[in-house]
């Protein structure tokens, strides 16, 4: 397959995975209540997440195309763990 087709398929896949940001609108009032912010502010948080995902996913896939997927998984798991550890 040509590289452009592969990149397009990856971008479409990233969009499909990232489209879950639209599903979140059903629980937006609960998110706003949990974070003690207004619903529009909670919506902006979801929008910021979706935009950053949509922009960074294809870029990161292109930048890491030459790296083994196994190496990427081994590196991203600890990075994700550290990013989700609460700073108390």
Image (cartoon, rainbow, N blue to C red):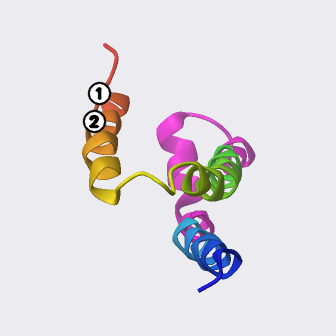
In percent of width and height, residue 81 lies at 27, 36
* Residue toward you, 72 or 28: 72
In percent of width and height, residue 59 lies at 65, 52
Dot 2 falls on a residue whose secondary structure is: helix
**Residue at (32%, 24%) from the top-left corner?**
86
Number of the label disc, if any, that sits on residue 85: 1
Res 38 quadrant in image: top right
> Which span is picked out in magenta?
19-44
Give the overall secondary structure of the magenta segment.
helix
**Residue at (71%, 41%) from the top-left corner?**
41
* Residue toward you, 49 or 70: 70
Dot 1 falls on a residue whose secondary structure is: loop
In percent of width and height, residue 66 lies at 47, 54
Q: Quadrant of the C terminus?
A: top left
Say above or below: 73 vs 22: above
Say above or below: 70 vs 76: below
Contact check, label 1 and label 2, Cβ < 8 Å: yes
Disc 2 marks which residue?
Answer: 81
Spatial separation of the CA atoms under disc 1 and disc 2: 6 Å
In percent of width and height, residue 60 lies at 57, 50
Q: Please check the rendered image and state whether residue 27 is part of the magenta-colored stretch, yes or no.
A: yes
Say above or below: 85 vs 5: above
**Residue at (29%, 48%) from the top-left corner?**
71
Q: Residue lying at the far bottom in this picture: please name it.
A: 1
**Residue at (35%, 49%) from the top-left corner?**
72
Name the front one of labels 1 and 2: 2
Left or right of 37 on screen, residue 77: left
């Amino acid at each position: 397959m040509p590289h452009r087709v592969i990149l397009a398929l990856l971008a479409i896949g990233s969009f499909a995975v990232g489209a879950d940001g639209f599903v979140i609108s059903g629980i937006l009032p609960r998110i706003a209540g949990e974070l003690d912010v207004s619903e529009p502010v909670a919506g902006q948080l979801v929008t910021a997440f979706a935009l950053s995902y949509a922009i960074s996913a294809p870029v990161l896939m292109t930048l890491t195309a030459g790296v083994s997927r196994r190496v990427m998984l081994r590196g991203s798991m600890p990075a994700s763990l550290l990013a989700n550890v609460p700073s108390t």
